[in-house]
Image: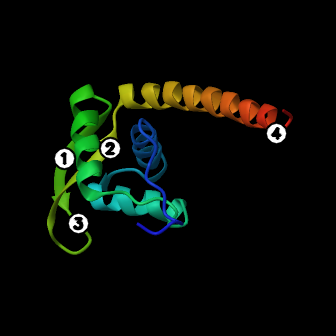
Amino acid sequence: MPDDKSEILQGTLDLMVLKTLDAMGPLHGYGIARRIEQLSQEALLVNQGTIYLCLVRLVQKGWIKAEWGTSENNRKAKFYSLSKSGRKQLAAETRNWERVAGVIGRLLQLEGRS
């Protein structure tokens, strides 16, 4: 893997998938992965196996729904959309991420002072 590409931090993929579906509406797995990569300006790589495991997990938790449809290239594909409980989870995950990011930011500022 090139040095300028990063793997997604453990636990953040759920948040990114929920936010992508909230912003974009229903998408298939490949579309979700590509959108995350695009928004990261290609700094993040989203492994196809990893995204599908995440989608299965989110469906099982009831945070997203899955329906079969036809993709833009006329193929059968499963499209995912945010559920009502997924919207609540997105809000909770966002608050948690902001809290954690703030703590890490403060710790990094302290490190520079020692």
Farthest front residue in view: 114
**Label 1 to label 2: alpha-carbon separation:** 8 Å
Q: Mark 1 points at which residue?
A: 67
Q: Decide which of tag 1 and tag 4 comes sooner along the chain.
A: 1
User: In this view, which residue lies farthest toward the bottom?
Assistant: 73
Label 4 element class: loop
**Residue annotated with mark 3:** 71
Q: Amino acid type of disc 1?
A: Glu
Is residue 108 shown left or right of residue 12?
A: right
Q: Assign a secondary structure to mark 3.
A: loop
Name the spot of residue 32 as percent of width and height, x first. 36, 56
Neighbours of disc 3 within 10 Å: few (<14), some (14-19), many (20+): some
Q: Which one is earlier in the sequence, the residue at label 1 or at label 2?
A: 1
The reply to whether discs 1 and 2 touch (Cβ–Cβ < 8 Å) is yes
Give the residue type that dot 2 points to: Ser
Q: Could you say which is closer to the camera, residue 30 or residue 69?
A: 30
Viewer-side label of 1, 4:
4
The alpha-carbon separation of the residues under discs 2 and 4 comes to 43 Å
- Is label 4 or label 3 in front? 4
At horizontal 32% and vertical 44% (from top left) the residue drawn is 81
**Dot 1, how many residues are within 10 Å of its Cα: few (below 14), some (14-19), or many (20+)?**
few
Q: Where is mark 2, residue-wise?
A: 81
Q: Are marks 1 and 4 in contact (CB under 8 Å)?
A: no
Asked whether disc 2 touches disc 4, contact meaning CB atoms under 8 Å apart, the reply is no
Residue at the image position 41 percent from the left and 38 percent from the top: 10
Numbered badge on residue 112: 4
Q: Quadrant of residue 59?
A: top left
Give the crowd class for mark 2: few <14, some 14-19, many >=20 residues within 10 Å: many
Viewer-nearest residue: 2 or 79: 2
